[in-house]
Image (spheres, helix red, strand yellow):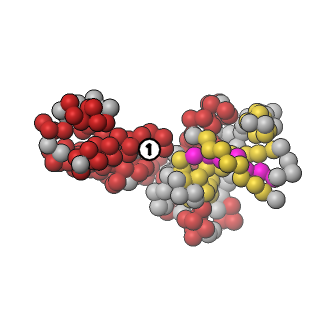
């Protein structure tokens, strides 16, 4: 029976465990397929096309934008062999999807893989994904240009929203000695603006932010202490 261990690992931790060589090479080098490491008492192969897809193509579902945030060890309960699976914050499995399905002639190569959550992968079935156009250099460049433009607009909106919130907080009153004493945060206007901007970005689309899960929680905690203070 397949079991899932309780411990969660960040992408940085998994990268450190399997090594940058295993994560960033496009193929599994001959003779290295069975390389494994000990992870908390379990044996884990370092090479996997799934790992390569996530670390080289990203942790975001190409369909819905869901983001993989943490890995968990999964395997047969009768064996000491495990492998890492990637999950989102809402515990949806992230998968390695074939852009061109094998049933339609697609190959098991990194160029033909993309990151997709299990739900979107199931809905796609064996259809040829629209992301096929990304295989041509010209179309890929055009698509990335559009994505960059959308990201810039989102960041500009996030910054504007953050500046508006900053004014609403009445800065002169916010940074008095009572606030520092009550919260333990000696914040200045620039640092608070940066926090508010990151929070706005997370509200627009989590995948636009490079914050790790623990950093997001710390950010939310800092902003909550400010909001609580203002509400008193």
Visible residue check, residue 1: yes
- Magenta stretch contains residue 71: yes
Q: Which image quarter is the N terminus in? A: bottom right
Question: Residue placed at 59% from the left, 52% from the top?
Answer: 87
- Magenta region's main secondary structure? strand
- Magenta stretch contains residue 50: no
Asked whether, in this view, residue 120 is left or right of residue 204, the answer is: right
Question: Residue placed at 34% from the left, 54% from the top?
Answer: 203
Residue nearest the viewer, comparing 220 with 68: 220
Q: Mark 1 points at which residue?
A: 217
Q: Residue 182 is drawn in which quadrant?
A: top left
List x then y, in percent, for residue 211: 43, 40
Q: In this view, does 198 lie above or below 60?
A: above
Visible residue check, residue 142: no
Mark 1 surroundings: few (<14), some (14-19) or many (≥20) residues within 10 A: few
Question: Residue placed at 15% from the left, 48% from the top?
Answer: 168
- Magenta-colored span: 70-76
List x then y, in percent, for residue 48: 70, 43
Residue nearest the viewer, comparing 170 with 45: 170
Q: Residue 9 is drawn in which quadrant?
A: top right
**As drawn, which residue projects farthest toward the right?**
78
List x then y, in percent, for residue 76: 81, 53
Q: Is residue 34 above or below residue 60?
A: above
Asked whether, in this view, residue 57 is left or right of residue 220, the answer is: right
List x then y, in percent, for residue 65: 46, 57
Give SS at disc 1: helix
Question: Residue placed at 23% from the left, 48% from the top?
Answer: 232
């Amino acid at each position: 029976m397949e079991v899932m261990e309780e411990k969660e690992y960040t992408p940085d931790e998994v990268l450190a465990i399997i090594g940058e060589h295993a994560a960033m090479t496009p193929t599994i080098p001959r003779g290295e397929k069975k390389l494994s490491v000990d992870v908390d008492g379990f044996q884990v192969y370092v090479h996997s096309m799934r790992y390569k897809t996530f670390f080289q193509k990203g942790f975001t579902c190409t369909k819905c934008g869901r983001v993989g945030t943490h890995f968990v060890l999964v395997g047969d309960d009768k064996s000491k062999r495990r492998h890492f699976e990637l999950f989102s914050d809402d515990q949806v499995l992230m998968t390695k999807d074939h852009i061109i399905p094998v049933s339609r002639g697609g190959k098991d190569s990194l160029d033909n893989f993309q990151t997709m959550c299990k739900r979107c992968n199931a809905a796609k079935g064996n259809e040829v994904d629209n992301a096929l156009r990304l295989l041509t250099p010209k179309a890929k460049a055009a698509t990335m240009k559009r994505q960059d433009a959308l990201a810039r607009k989102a960041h500009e909106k996030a910054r504007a929203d953050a500046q508006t919130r900053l004014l609403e907080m009445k800065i002169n009153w916010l940074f008095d000695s009572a606030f520092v004493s009550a919260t333990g945060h000696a914040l200045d206007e620039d640092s608070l603006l940066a926090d508010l901007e990151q929070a706005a970005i997370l509200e627009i689309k989590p995948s636009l932010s490079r914050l790790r899960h623990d950093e997001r929680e710390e950010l939310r905690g800092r902003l909550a202490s400010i909001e609580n203070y203002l509400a008193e």
